[in-house]
Amino acid sequence: MKVMVGGTFDPLHDGHKRLITRSFELAGKKGSVTIGLTTDQFARRKCHPVKEYSARKASLENYIRESGFSAHYRVEPLNDRYGSAVSENFDALVVSEETLPIAREINILRHEKGKRKVDIHQITCVLADDDRWISSTRIYRGEIDEHGRLLHRD
Amino acid sequence: MKVMVGGTFDPLHDGHKRLITRSFELAGKKGSVTIGLTTDQFARRKCHPVKEYSARKASLENYIRESGFSAHYRVEPLNDRYGSAVSENFDALVVSEETLPIAREINILRHEKGKRKVDIHQITCVLADDDRWISSTRIYRGEIDEHGRLLHRD
């Protein structure tokens, strides 16, 4: 299966890892995964500082290599919320609870363009120790670490 | 992975087959699939006649047998829109474009009950030859057959 997934992935936390892992599982050994990675310009809209594209890409590639996934993959720059997902031929989009609305918008746009709609696989967000979502914002705020462990600062 | 899927499945058309096939693929060889099959009483709300539970169950089981899926499965009666999906421990719910809202309701109800939310896998509906969804209603109306072929009546 040909799968697409997207994000800023900074820092690469357990929620992101779940998203990437599921994308490769869904693609299967002979499938492919296209990872849309937000460009530095597009990632600037975030409410926290974001590492450079090259560093975020290296971090993603390192995680994929360590995990030993079999499917082919490539990382491509994402300049807006949709990227090539509105025009490319693929089978399924993997999203989180937060980004499910974007997946639905992508299918509406595909339909308007006369493109086949794609399947949507929505994973649940990974919870931190306090049962709230792990998010990059919370990590940047120093509330939790990449694994959702609470950081009690003095 | 432990997967749940539900429906009336009458007649078992290509859209249903896609839903069932994807459920087994997602479950994997060592996983399990629970199929909620609407009871005759609950299926009565449909705008067309529906075959008896036992006949619909036999048709599902026949398709699963013919397809040679490896995952364990069981068919259980579905008396309302949610069934055991609001209370059981499982990993992912497989739905169609039509039933995505029910999956989201199930996650809200699970959260309210203090149960872990589940992943949602939404397949696109299979299109008939006229690029509209294959549906049981259209088949009962005599517009299309189970494979979405247009039936031109004299």
Image (tube, coloured by chain):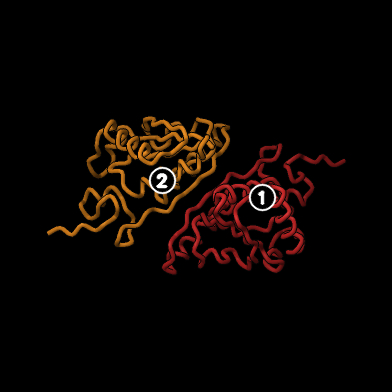
Chain colours: A orange, B red
- Labels 2 and 1 within one chain: no
The amino acid beneath tag 1 is: His
- Which image quarter is the C terminus of chain A in? bottom left
Is B134 on the left or on the right of B140, as rendered? Answer: left
Q: Chain of mark 1?
A: B
**Residue A33, percent across and down?**
46, 35
Task: Write down the residue under mark 1.
Answer: B16
- The residue sitting at 58% across, 44% down in the picture is B124
Q: Residue at x 37, y 54 (%)?
A: A126
Q: Is residue A37 left or right of residue B85?
A: left
Q: Mark 2 Cα within 10 Å, few/some/many (few <14, many 20+)?
A: many
* Secondary structure of residue under mark 2: helix
Residue B154 at what x, y percent from top left?
A: 88, 40
Disc 2 target residue: A19
The kind of residue tagged 2 is: Leu
Please say if B113 is above or below B118: below
